[in-house]
Image (spheres, coloured by chain):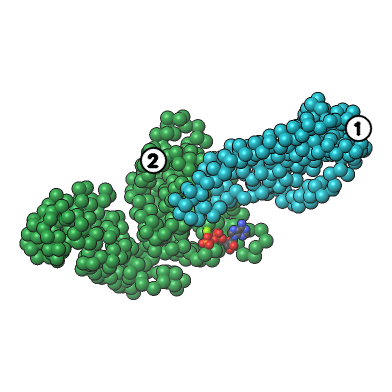
Chain colours: A cyan, B green
């Protein structure tokens, strides 16, 4: 931001530094994660695993847990997008001015409720399937950041730009899709990234209602007094969350319209 | 029948047009009647909040009128599809409003694309418009707005509004956001363009000097968009209709009238000052200077643009080295365009050491000089004419 204020040369230098930093992040994040996982692998290899431990800590269990967690997170994020983006668009239209505060309040409550409570509620009252209930719960939990990202993204679009578009005879529809949405993308994506990380990270809770995920390693290890299993599960969950954030960051850079 | 009507019918006619914003006591625009003749620039000018923007935006129905009617080329457009109506009118807003995520070429192509022009036609038009507003297409067409200066963006905004060659242009303080120098340049350029395109233009400003300079006619508006006077700049300056108008014109009416005459309207001296080309020698320059009996001579560059004012003392100091002629004397600070007003010229003159302004043509080549005497003569002439007119109207009043 401050780069804009300083002269051309300085802003270019800052720009170069920033792109250097970005490249470092592109490579550095997965490298750090890989090192952590490798260290954990070597450590586990060096240990004598007892019966219970080797049942929890093995390649098949870990792979399944990872897939379950990714699956829940992706479905939940997709569901969130399908609901929150159109809702965000609708709430920023002038005709929705009355209901907007009410919906925002509801979304706030959605995120305010403890995630675990929400999951149990859905599981017990609505859906007796662990992973489906988890997907729904995560989606509700993640609606707020995407909704807010969409709304703030649309609201910060320069009124002059919209007025110019209308003044040239663009229909409201094409103003929305050709002008407002592209200009809202950077902020919208920040919301999506938050939602993605949020769902990946909280997906471990699905283990409480039989939805699998790394949560199972954590809960199982805890229940049977095997801290190594808890550590492996935690590292797995953290790895996924960090990678989700990393992918989100790259997507933000790639999808940002040129010229902004 | 239709041709007969076209001849007498103004391009835009507002009939008792009113806007009453909900929840407000008084209407922002209170029953304005206005006829804008074809091919003219009509300026809406008035104090802040008097309803200029509201009036302008009712013409393309960005703001829907509460009552009254709008006619475009004799057709009642008060209730036609507003999107289609707007494609027939170019609109330049004060904030310019270029699309930041689109290139300059894409921005300009907006309306032609909506109208379904093919690629070739769109590209040719973009090229043509960029040339017209003085931007090199090869350099600028693929840039993004943030990579342009404020003045360049203004030009693109104007080009975009003209893209589909609409008969009408609405402009809301189009040059408002620029510094005075850029602003003056944009104004001159725009007047030059208008000479060729002859669009019907409704132009909003709150700057009376801009109004006088740009307008074929001026509408002076008071609170509620009530017309205080609607006339040519000359008539308004000579005969303000009311105290309100007089107050709005402010002090220095005489100086303001300098805005009405352009450099090209007065005598530009072509032989008062000697000129030399860049290939001349200092010796030659000295000879010319002595022959002319003047204090300075003017050095032109290889494109005949005024480069430097050179005095005899400068030549002495150079020791007669011809190679350094281009370094001698003082650089010509600024030149006036032949489209510039006498007011602009006066300013340049006062800045220049020897009290004359170098006049250049469209291409920036030297066209002559203008001095203070010429301006004073022009003022005298104007004053005589105004007195004449005033006495003749007084005489008419008696009989
Ligand atoms: N959307 C709106 N809702 C309510 N009132 C408005 C709205 N737009 C303008 N007004 C009011 O209408 C009046 C005229 O506004 P308008 O924008 O036409 O003024 P203007 O002459 O263009 O002023 P300026 O020179 O400051 O741009 C003002 O009193 C303004 O407060
Ligand atoms: Mg205004």
| Residue B303 in the image, given as x and y percentages of width and height | 22, 47
| Residue B38 in the image, given as x and y percentages of width and height | 40, 48
- Kindly identify which residue carries mark 2: B139
Viewport quadrant of the N terminus of chain B? top left
- Kindly identify which residue carries mark 1: A128
Front position in the image: B109 or B99: B99
Q: Are marks 1 and 2 on the same chain?
A: no
Direction top: furthest residue: A60
Q: Secondary structure at mark 1?
A: loop
Q: Chain of mark 2?
A: B
Front position in the image: A131 or B173: A131
- Residue at x 44% of width, y 48% of height: B148
| Residue B136 in the image, given as x and y percentages of width and height | 36, 42
Write down the quadrant of residue A204 in the picture: top right
Q: Is residue B245 left or right of residue B318?
A: right
Q: Is residue B310 left or right of residue B4?
A: left
Q: Secondary structure at mark 2?
A: helix
Front position in the image: A33 or B61: A33
CA separation, marks 1 and 2? 64 Å
């Amino acid at each position: 931001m401050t780069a804009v204020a300083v002269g051309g040369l300085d802003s270019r230098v800052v720009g170069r530094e920033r792109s250097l930093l970005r490249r470092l992040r592109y490579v550095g994040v997965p490298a750090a994660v890989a090192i952590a996982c490798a260290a954990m692998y070597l450590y586990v290899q060096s240990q004598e695993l007892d019966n219970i431990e080797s049942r929890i800590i093995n390649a098949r269990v870990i792979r399944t847990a990872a897939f379950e967690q990714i699956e829940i997170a992706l479905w939940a994020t997709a569901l969130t997008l399908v609901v929150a983006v159109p809702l965000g668009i609708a709430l920023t239209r002038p005709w929705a001015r009355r209901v907007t505060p009410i919906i925002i309040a509801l979304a706030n409550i959605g995120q305010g409720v403890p995630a675990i409570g929400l999951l149990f509620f859905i599981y017990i009252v609505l859906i007796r399937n662990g992973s489906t209930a988890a997907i729904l719960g995560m989606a509700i939990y993640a609606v707020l950041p995407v909704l807010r990202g969409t709304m703030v993204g649309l609201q910060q679009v320069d009124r002059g730009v919209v007025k110019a578009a209308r003044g040239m005879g663009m229909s409201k529809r094409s103003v929305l899709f050709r002008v407002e949405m592209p200009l809202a993308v950077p902020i919208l994506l920040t919301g999506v990234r938050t939602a993605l990380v949020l769902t990946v990270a909280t997906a471990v809770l699905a283990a409480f209602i039989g939805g699998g995920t790394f949560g199972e390693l954590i809960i199982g290890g805890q229940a049977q007094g095997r801290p190594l299993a808890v550590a492996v599960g935690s590292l797995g969950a953290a790895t996924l969350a960090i990678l989700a954030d990393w992918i989100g960051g790259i997507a933000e850079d790639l999808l940002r319209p040129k010229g902004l | 029948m239709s041709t007969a009507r076209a001849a007498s019918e103004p391009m835009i006619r507002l009939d008792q047009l009113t806007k009453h914003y909900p929840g407000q006591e008084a209407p922002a625009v209170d029953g304005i009647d206005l006829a804008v003749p074809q091919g003219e620039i009509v300026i809406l000018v008035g104090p802040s909040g008097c309803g200029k923007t509201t009036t302008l935006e009712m013409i393309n129905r960005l703001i829907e009128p509460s009552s009254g009617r709008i006619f475009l080329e004799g057709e009642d457009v008060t209730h036609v599809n507003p999107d289609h109506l707007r494609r027939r009118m170019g609109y330049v807003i004060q904030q310019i409003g270029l699309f930041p995520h689109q290139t300059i070429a894409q921005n300009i192509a907006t309306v032609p694309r909506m109208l379904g022009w093919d690629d070739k036609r769109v590209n040719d038009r973009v090229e043509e418009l960029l040339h017209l507003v003085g931007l090199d297409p090869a350099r600028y067409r693929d840039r993004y707005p943030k990579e342009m200066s404020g003045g360049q963006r203004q030009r693109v905004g104007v080009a975009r509004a003209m893209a589909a060659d609409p008969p009408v242009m609405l402009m809301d303080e189009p040059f408002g956001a620029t510094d005075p120098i850029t602003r003056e340049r944009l104004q001159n350029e725009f007047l030059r363009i208008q000479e060729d395109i002859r669009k019907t233009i409704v132009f909003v400003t709150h700057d009376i000097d801009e109004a006088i300079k740009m307008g074929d006619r001026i509408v002076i508006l008071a609170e509620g968009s009530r017309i205080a006077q609607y006339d040519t700049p000359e008539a308004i300056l000579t005969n303000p209709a009311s105290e309100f108008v007089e107050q709005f014109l402010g002090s220095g009416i005489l100086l303001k009238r300098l805005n009405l005459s352009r450099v090209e309207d007065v005598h530009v001296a072509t032989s008062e000052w000697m000129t030399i080309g860049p290939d001349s020698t200092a010796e030659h320059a000295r000879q010319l200077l002595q022959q002319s009996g003047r204090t300075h001579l003017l050095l032109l560059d290889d494109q005949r643009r005024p480069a430097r004012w050179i005095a005899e003392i400068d030549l002495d100091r150079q020791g007669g080295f011809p190679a350094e002629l281009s370094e001698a004397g003082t650089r010509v600070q600024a030149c006036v365009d032949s489209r510039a007003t006498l007011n602009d010229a006066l300013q340049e003159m006062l800045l220049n050491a020897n009290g004359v302004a170098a006049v250049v043509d469209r291409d920036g080549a030297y066209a002559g000089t203008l001095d203070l005497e010429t301006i004073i003569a022009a003022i005298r002439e104007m004053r005589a004419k105004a007195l004449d007119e005033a006495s003749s109207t007084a005489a008419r009043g008696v009989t």
